[in-house]
Image (cartoon, rainbow, N blue to C red):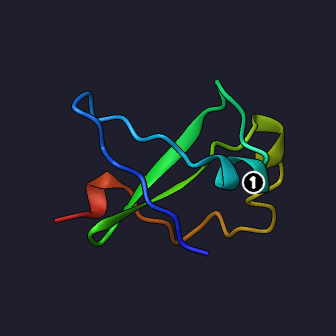
Amino acid sequence: MSYTATLSSKFQLSIPKAVRDELHWEAGQEFVLITKHQGVLVMPAPEVTELAGIAKGARRDGHRDRNDRN
């Protein structure tokens, strides 16, 4: 389903109640905003405990850092 929201003069958006209820979002919850082309992906910020082991098995060699960039 599609919902709309209007950007206020203070650059705030109100999330429609149906969306908040469906996604179990609550007041004071922290979110991550990721720009995508001409839009924004909004998702709850993960807890530190949810990130544990996220890179398990990742290769430690062959990575690039800022010094490798032109």
- The residue labelled by disc 1 is 23
The image quadrant that residue 39 belongs to is bottom left
Task: Check the image and name the residue furthest to the top.
Answer: 28
Q: How many marks on residues?
A: 1
Q: SS at mark 1? A: helix
Residue at 76 percent of width and 49 percent of height: 21
Of residue 25 and residue 65, the one placed in the foreground of this image is: 25
Residue at 49 percent of width and 66 percent of height: 63
Q: Is residue 27 left or right of residue 23?
A: left
Q: Is residue 15 left or right of residue 51?
A: left
Vertical placement of residue 68 versus 8, above or below: below
Q: Is residue 15 left or right of residue 13?
A: right
Please state, as top left, top right, bottom left or bottom right, where the C terminus lies in the image: bottom left
- Position in image of residue 17 (x %, y %): 65, 46
Residue at 22 percent of width and 31 percent of height: 9
Tag 1: amino acid: Leu
Within 10 Å of the Cα at label 1, are there few (<14), some (14-19), or many (20+) other Cα atoms?
Answer: few
- Position in image of residue 65 (x %, y %): 38, 56
Please state, as top left, top right, bottom left or bottom right, where the N terminus lies in the image: bottom right
Residue at 59 percent of width and 67 percent of height: 61
- Position in image of residue 46 (x %, y %): 70, 44
- Position in image of residue 68 (x %, y %): 29, 63
Of residue 29 and residue 64, the one placed in the foreground of this image is: 29
The image quadrant that residue 13 belongs to is top left
